[in-house]
Amino acid sequence: MSNSVVAKRYALALFELSQQHGQTGSIQEEMKELKKAFRDNKGLGELLDSPKLSSTKKKEIIANIFKGVNPLVLNALYVLLDAKRLNEVQNVFDEFLTLVDDAAGIAEAKVYSTRPLTEQETNALSATFAKKIGKHSLRIENIIDPSLIGGVRLQIGNQIYDSSLSAKLDKLQRKLIGS
């Protein structure tokens, strides 16, 4: 999630509009694709940021590249362009996706483990820790970290739950040295 106040305002406006029109789900999917498009094509951002092109020409480029995109999303891109805030587009996408997840009771989580988690283990972690943070479920990204030795380390936002064997050994070592 970004710390951009500007991005939060634009994302909130788009989120409220998408809710009013009952299109939150479809716009969420388009946002994920647009986020990839802007991230993977650095030249696109540079082209749209170029002072050599007029605002009208930039809008034509956006319209041609993103044919078939929801008009609300297209208009949001035009508003960002007109306000000279297109450099915030990735942050707006991130904020919008966060708002949708919050409304649905979903949180992003990273689970570090020594091996890939099974679907059953992922579901159990999601159910257990979602309740602790007041959400319905977690969208878990499993990251393999052999240095944990065993167990898992779960990160949700800025909260970390560490039940890894390496953390327990470190704690035991501190206890033994401190005694």
Image: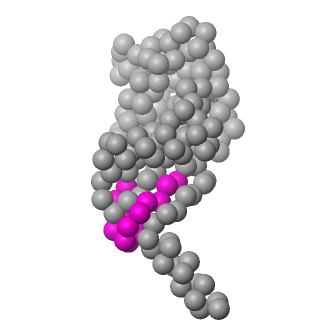
Q: Is residue 146 left or right of residue 31?
A: left
Query: Taking the image as drawn, is residue 169 in sight?
Result: yes
Where is residue 110? Give x, y as percent.
46, 51
Is residue 129 inside the magenta stretch? no
Q: Is residue 25 left or right of residue 177?
A: left
Location of the N terminus by quadrant is top right
Where is residue 167? Give x, y as percent.
50, 72
Q: Quadrant of residue 102?
A: top right
**Residue at 62 percent of width and 43 percent of height:** 133
**Residue at 59 percent of width and 91 percent of height:** 177
Q: Quadrant of residue 135?
A: top right
**Residue at 55 percent of width and 26 percent of height:** 104
Where is residue 24? Give x, y as percent.
51, 17
Q: Is 27 drawn above or below residue 107 in the view shown?
A: above
Q: How many marks?
A: 0
Q: Quadrant of residue 86?
A: top right
Q: Is 148 drawn above or below residue 124 in the view shown?
A: below
Between residue 65 and residue 126, name the one nearer to us: 126
Give the magenta-colored segment's residue range: 143-155
Query: Taking the image as drawn, is residue 59 in sight?
Result: no
Q: In this view, which residue lies farthest toward the top?
A: 21
Location of the C terminus by quadrant is bottom right
Where is residue 96? Give x, y as percent.
56, 29
Q: Is 22 drawn above or below residue 56 in the view shown?
A: above
